Every structure is written in structure tokens, then in C-alpha cells.
Image (tube, helix red, strand yellow):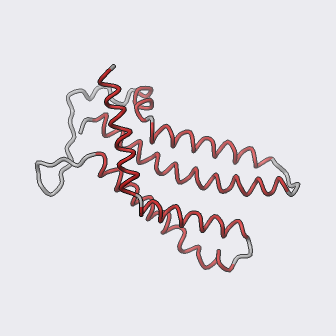
């Protein structure tokens, strides 16, 4: 695995984490829309909107356009002769980016479940509908990540392969 590919995988892992934060901000954003409809102040609404846009933009860039970040920050320079190898059980098989992205999706899903499950009793007892909706949506997202982790990792890895092909052609 080249250093550039390693940086791509690292950026995708951060992108998955930021995507989870973007979803959390989006849920806050929906709550503020309801507050605005009820005539409450809108000052924090714009902060929440900017935070949501920030997380969404950065997570999109990290997940689908990591080569832009690598090129802008010049992360791949100076490592031309380096080559990393992470080994599976057989010493001749390298772990590819798909495996690492798949593992990071699992870790993200488990992180969401670990942080949300302890809140379940207080959320169920709560009369606040927004808290219940947030809790349910986060659990659904975590379960979808677990259920579709291979497809998501394959899609993200295919995006990386397409970027590599574009770079080789230019």
C-alpha cells in the first residue's frame, strides 16, 4: 500500500466519523426548524445550519474526493519510494483499503450503539419527542451501518479505484 493510498483510507475513516456528526447536526437542525415555527429565537439556528453544512461538506470531501485533500495538503509528496504493507494471516496477502474501510464502518456503528444504548432508559421515560426521534434515528443508522457495511465499504473502495484510474490517465 502506497502512502497516498494510506492517506486516502485515513481520510475515509475520518469522513465516516464526520458523517455521523453531520447526521447528529442535521437532527439538531430539524429541531431548530420546529422551534422557529413556534416563534422562538433563531440565533442558534444559523450556528446549527453552519455546523451541519461544515460537517456535511468535509465528510463528503473526505469520503468521495480524498485526492483533492491529499493534493492540496501535499500529503503524498516525499514518500515516493515508501511502501506500507499490512499483513493478513498469510504473509503474502496485503490488507486492502476495502478491509480497513469496512472495519472503520463497524467501529463507527458500534461507537454509535455504545453511546446511545445507555441513553435508552432516559429517552424512553422522556416526554420530549425530539429526543426520542434522535435516539431512534441514531439506532437505525447504526444498524444500517452494521447491516450494509460491506456494500458501503465496497462503494467507497470503488470510488477510490475510480479516482486512481483518473489520476493514471491524466
Q: Residue 72 in the image: x percent, y percent? A: 44, 26
Query: In the image, 77: left or right of 35?
Result: left
| Vertical comparison of 121 with 162: above or below | below
Query: In the image, 13: left or right of 99?
Result: right
Query: In the image, 101: left or right of 61?
Result: left
Quarter containing the N terminus: top left
Q: Dividing the picture into quarters, in which one does residue 88 lie? A: bottom left
**Closest to the observer, 34 or 41:** 34
Q: Residue 16 in the image: x percent, y percent? A: 46, 50
Q: Residue at x 35, y 34 (%)?
A: 162
| Vertical comparison of 167 with 54: above or below | above
Q: Residue 140 in the image: x percent, y percent? A: 53, 65
Q: Residue at x 58, y 50 (%)?
A: 22
Query: In the image, 33: left or right of 146?
Result: right
**Closest to the observer, 103 or 74:** 103
Q: Residue at x 60, y 41 (%)?
A: 54
Quarter containing the C terminus: top left
| Vertical comparison of 145 with 98: above or below | below
Q: Residue 8 in the image: x percent, y percent? A: 36, 39
Amino acid at each position: 500500500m502506497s502512502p497516498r493510498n494510506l492517506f486516502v483510507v485515513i481520510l475515509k475513516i475520518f469522513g465516516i466519523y464526520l458523517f455521523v456528526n453531520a447526521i447528529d447536526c442535521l437532527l439538531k437542525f430539524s429541531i431548530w426548524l420546529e422551534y422557529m415555527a413556534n416563534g422562538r429565537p433563531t440565533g442558534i439556528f444559523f450556528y446549527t445550519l453552519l455546523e451541519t453544512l461544515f460537517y456535511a461538506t468535509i465528510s463528503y470531501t473526505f469520503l468521495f474526493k480524498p485526492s483533492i485533500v491529499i493534493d492540496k495538503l501535499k500529503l503524498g509528496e516525499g514518500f515516493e519510494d515508501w511502501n506500507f504493507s499490512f499483513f493478513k494471516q498469510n504473509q503474502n496477502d496485503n490488507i486492502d483499503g476495502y478491509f480497513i474501510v469496512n472495519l472503520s464502518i463497524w467501529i463507527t456503528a458500534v461507537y454509535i450503539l455504545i453511546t446511545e444504548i445507555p441513553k435508552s432508559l432516559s429517552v424512553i421515560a422522556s416526554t420530549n419527542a425530539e429526543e426520542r426521534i434522535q435516539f431512534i434515528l441514531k439506532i437505525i443508522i447504526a444498524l444500517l451501518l452494521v447491516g450494509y457495511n460491506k456494500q458501503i465499504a465496497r462503494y467507497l473502495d470503488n470510488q477510490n479505484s475510480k479516482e486512481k484510474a483518473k489520476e493514471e490517465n491524466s
